[in-house]
Image: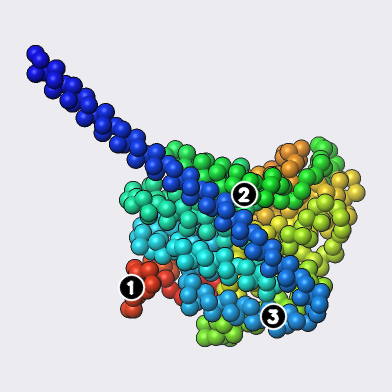
Amino acid sequence: MKTDLTELRIRHMRHLRRSARVTTAQWRRKIVYWAAAVLVGVVAVGFATAADSAAALRTRLVAWDPWIMLALTPAGLALSTWLTRTWFRGAQGSGIPQTIAALHLENFTIVDRLLSLRIAFGKILLTTLGLLAGASIGREGPTVQVGAAIMHNFGRWLNLSTVSVRRGLILAGGASGVSAAFNTPLGGIVFAIEELSHSFEQRTSGTMLTGVILSGVTAIALVGNYTYFGHTDVVVPIGISWMAVLTCGILGGISGGVFSAILIRTSQHGLPGILGRFVVRRPITFAASCGLVLAILGIASGGITYGTGYLQAREIIAGQTSYPASFFILKYIATIVSYCSGIPGGLFAPSLAIGAGIGGWVAQFLPHTTPGAVVLLGTVAYFSAVVQAPLTASVIVMEMSDNQQVTLALLATSFLAYAVSRMICSRSLYSALAEKFLSVVEQAPPAETPKPEGGTALPAPTNGERAS
């Protein structure tokens, strides 16, 4: 009897020791997750600071001599393309298609290269260079890939082998990047569910939510609790004011759907004719040519087509100034040219600026609706039509303007624009670009020469990948 009791006690003690070891390991892993999420917030703030500094330097150069951009923009885009193709393959485009592709790749050797810290560094460096050169790009999409890379590499450091856990970290990193870049934690969560994963899995939700909260808190601690577009008090009461919902939804849906269709067409088939062959043979010269076009557009517009368009969008939403229809038309063209050039950079900020421009132009024809409200509706309409993620667009615009009074109108406009966009472009832009990226990466032959990080080499960006 005593022997049985002794054995039972020994087994119980062993069980307690094993449980303690498991608990300690779990807490160590959680602490590492939290540290990674905090780091995403720190890097996102540093990225934003670098991007703003580059934009400020470009503005001073343009004020000194606008014609200097005829040299700076072509040279900057050519250098960015050369660096991308030589040192940072996989950094091209916005970064969101790469993150979506990483969530679906079975070969984690390729994922390790696609979400390496070197690629993340290149994404920050080259996006900042593109903004300095005057390209119509944003930093928010690149921040998604950078956030995913940071979380993924922390997972590698912990030697995680479970596919679902590693994908959960990538998803959490991407969502954290959106949250920290825009200071829109709810938008980051919805974006991860609606656009990145297209599902909500219980086993990854806790990691994602924790990452979004910690990265967002870190960003707020470093730069303060701000709203991306300031605070607005505009409303859209039920009645004749909802003409703005119909007008912005239809116009935003058409323009955004055409934009997505152009990028997808370029991704799948490249540019037509002689121009397409020129891109394949002389990609760096082509990037310089795109830079020349951007410089001409910038000079013709007085410099308002350069960069993210954030300042112009904020001024339009706040009612501080008004821009002619030529603003969003030229910004629209500049964004297409920037993405076809092959440089790293995002779509979010330019899309918000174009949408604000559309809303500001429409507002003058709708005197029964508050102009600021029409601008918000134009912003959400075009953004939703481009990304084809209506919930994400509504939540992000609502959080960025700190205005819940227009939620219903935002949702109605966003879903209307989404429906119109789907009639023009039946495929989601980011999903289509991710599929193209997956097909190129998975069909790429193994590298014949050793690469710095080992594994399968990512192919040089084709014209289709440049559009991503």
- 459 vs 402, nearest the viewer: 402
Which of the image's four quarters has the C terminus?
bottom right
Which label lies toward us, 1 or 2? 2
Q: Is residue 449 visible?
A: yes
Label 3 belongs to which residue? 72
Q: Position of residue 94 (x, y in %)?
A: 57, 63
Q: Can you name the residue that lies furthest to the top here?
A: 1
Q: Residue at x 43, y 41 (%)?
A: 30
CA gap, disc 3 and disc 1: 37 Å
Name the amino acid, label 3: Leu
CA gap, disc 3 and disc 2: 32 Å
Instruction: Specify whether 324 is left or right of 138.
Output: right
Q: Is residue 424 visible?
A: no
Which of the image's four quarters has the N terminus?
top left
Tally of numbered discs:
3
Q: Quadrant of residue 45?
A: bottom right
Q: Position of residue 278 (x, y in %)?
A: 56, 85
- Element type at mark 1: loop
Q: Residue at x 77, y 57 (%)?
A: 313
Name the amino acid, label 1: Pro
- Element type at mark 3: helix
CA gap, disc 1 and disc 2: 40 Å
Number of residues whose C-alpha sits closer than 10 Å to that of mark 2, classed few (under 14), some (14–19) or many (20 or more): many
Number of residues whose C-alpha sits closer than 10 Å to that of mark 1, classed few (under 14), some (14–19) or many (20 or more): few
Name the amino acid, label 2: Ala
Mark nearer the N terminus (1 vs 2): 2
Could you tell me if the residues under marks 1 and 2 are in contact, i.e. CB atoms within 8 Å? no
Mark nearer the N terminus (3 vs 2): 3
Q: Residue at x 47, y 66 (%)?
A: 118
Label 1 belongs to which residue? 446
Label 2 belongs to which residue? 219
- 43 vs 205, nearest the viewer: 43
